[in-house]
Image (cartoon, grey):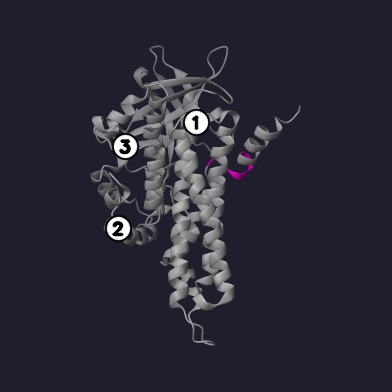
Amino acid sequence: MDLQELLPDELLERFRVRAKGYDERNEFFHEDFAELKDQGYLRMFAATHDGGLGFGLEQAAAAQRRLATAAPATALAINMHLVWTGVAHLLAQRGDNSLHYVLTEAVAGEVFAFGNSEAGNDSVLFDSNTVAAPQGDGSYSFTGTKIFTSLSPAWTRLGIFGKDSSGEEAVLVHAFITRETPGYTIKDDWNTLGMRASQSNTTVLDGVVAPADRVFRKLSVGPNADPLIFSIFACFETLLAAVYTGLGERALQLGVETVHKRKSKKSGKSYAQDPDIRWRIADAALAMDGLYPQLESVARDVDNLVNHGSQWFPKMVGLKVRATETARTVVDLIIRVSGGSSYFAGNELGRLYRDVLAGMFHPSDDESAHSTIANAWLGPLED
């Protein structure tokens, strides 16, 4: 299935029209979600012989980029499901079928979400404030608070992790719970500046138990070379970059449309003929043109099992930071040439201006990315 068939223009236009209302009402994208499920979008990473679309990461990133040109918050939330299914796909590619059930359940209609982020945990996947307590039968209970849990109204499977400090050496325990599992609460606290339709509410884990057959990894605290960590970073950073690339792409499209429509009182010509405005549009186009091939290249190399060794994580976090920062710069440039109407509530460009700011909060943030890249090129800091 090609992108035009998966996300036809008329479908994207419906999403674009709805995005305004979802944002204004601070409401989850229920209609978009239903249509994406009907299109098979949530099973894109499953093999065709299993009922999926057979996509790799490059195709998935292209789809997310296209979706984000219509509804960035919809794309951002769907990312979380695609990250888990993408992780299962990448692991299987590398000979590890431990999460194959994620793909088969996605084909069956289950919806996966991420319950990993924690306030103040700048170690991200390498440590946790959540307590994972062994129950004696291989199951674990989890107690802690997870933030930015996108797809809160829709997930049926939530990936969580916490730290088990009961043994001689602490381990990080990764598991899935279902929506029917008792012991968690979803707060109604998503009232943000942008990306409002994602409804990424806080999830409080209060002794919620993941059964033994859904405890899928136990890893040491700290940086880890386990394929699970690589796969999560590869899918999360690449698909996140795709969303913000699509957002920047849409902003540029809006800018071009707007300056052709606006006319100067002095000259009577459209602002597309104004040298200063042309310069800003060109600046935005130059910035975006450098982003598209980087996104495609990183995703393709993941698909092709290219061995970048110690440079893999710098490539992935670098892509994420460049995409989010470039999109923010582009939206700002386009706002400057689009006139005061973009400042009004309900204006699409004004919404993109708010949505794009979320990019700086996703891991890896600017500071963490620079540390990762510096370590790769210069070695770690001396004690």
Does dot 2 land on a helix, a strand or a loop? helix
The answer to which of 330 and 180 lies nearer the viewer is 330
Does dot 3 land on a helix, a strand or a loop? loop
Inspect the image, locate mark 1, and give the three-letter code of the amino acid beneath it: Val
Q: Earlier in the sequence, mark 3 or mark 2?
A: 2
Return the x and y of residue 372 as percentages of the image width and height. 63, 35
Return the x and y of residue 70 as percentages of the image width and height. 37, 57
Image quarter in which the C terminus is found: top right
Q: Residues within 10 Å of mark 1 (few under 14, many from 20)?
A: few
Mark 2 lies on residue: 9
How many labels were placed on the picture? 3
Which residue is depicted at the point 57% across and 63% down? Answer: 283
Mark 1 lies on residue: 306
**Segment colored magenta:** 363-368
Which residue is depicted at the point 38% across and 36% down? Answer: 56
Q: Residues within 10 Å of mark 3 (few under 14, many from 20)?
A: many
Q: Nearer the viewer, mark 3 or mark 2?
A: 2
